[in-house]
Image (tube, rainbow, N blue to C red):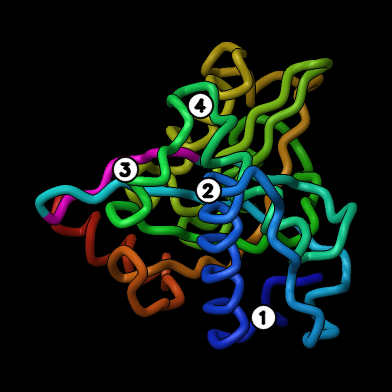
Amino acid sequence: MDPDEITLEEGAELVRLARSAVEKYLSEGKEVSPPADRDKFRRPGASFVTIMSVSNGREELRGCIGYTRAFEPLHVNVVHAAIAAATQDPRFPPLSLSELDRVVFEVSILSKPELLEGVGRDLFGQIVIGRDGLIVESGYYTGLLLPEVPVEYCWDKETFLSETCLKAYLPPDCWMERDVHVYRFRTKAFKEEKPKGKVFERDLHKEYVERCSKKA
C-alpha cells in the first residue's frame, strides 16, 4: 500500500478507527473489528499511530508506535499500532480511558523504505525535509524517525541523520560509516484538529517552511 493511494476521506476513517480501537481496548480489553467495506484497507499496509495530549492549546507526545513493513491488512495494522501507542510505548505509562477526551490521534501511512546510496554527505541530496522519514540500521540496532519529527523541531538534514542515529542507540555521526544502512520513506499523515475533532491531512513541507523560516 503506497500512502499516495489514501484519500483524505479514507485517512479520516483510519484516524477514527485508531481512536475507536483504543477506546474499546481500554474499556473492554478487546480489539475492535476493522471495517470490511473498503477493499483498499484489506491490502497489506504499514502505519504509525501518534497520540498527543492537549492542554491549554499545546500538544505533548503521549505515545507513538508503528510498523515499517506491510505484513498485515492496513486496517488491522492501524488497530494494532493504535493499541500499542496507547499501552506499550515504554516512554509513557499506559493511556487511561479518562484521557481520551484530552488527546488527539494522528495516523501515518508509510511507503516501502528505500536504501540510500553512498555514505556521509552523499546522503544529503537524497533526503527532503518535509517528505522523507529515515531509518538507520547497523547490526541489531535500528532507529526510525517519521517525516513529522524534523519539521516539528526545524532540523536540517545533518541533524535529522544524527538524531536518527541516536534513536538507534548509535553515535550521532553513525551516518558517516560505510557499514551503516540509511533508508528513507514517505508518509501521508492524517490528524485530528482537536480531540474527537475534524481530521485533516498534514502538509509537512508547508509546515516546515512556515514554522522554520520564522526561526531562521
Q: Which residues are magenta?
A: 57-63
- Compare residues 34 and 60 and report the one nearer the observer: 34
The amino acid at mark 2 is: Ser
The three-letter amino acid code for the residue at tag 4 is Ser
For residue 216, say whether it is visible. no
Q: Nearer the viewer, residue 165 or 80?
A: 80
Residue 21 is tagged as none
User: Image check: 168 left or right of 97?
Assistant: right
Q: Say whether residue 200 is magenta.
A: no
Cα distance between the residues tagged 3 and 1: 26 Å
Res 183 quadrant in image: top right
Mark 1: which secondary structure?
Answer: loop
Question: In front: mark 4 or mark 1?
Answer: 1
Where residue 4 appears, as percent x and y from the top left, is 68, 78
Q: Please name the residue shown 82% across and 49% down the image.
A: 69
Q: Which residue is mark 2?
A: 27
Amino acid carrying label 3: it is Tyr
Residue 128 image point, x, y percent = 53, 57
Mark 3 vs 2: CB contact within 8 A:
no
Residue designated by label 3:
153
Q: Any mark on residue 6, and which?
A: 1
- Contact? badges 4 and 3 (CB < 8 Å): no
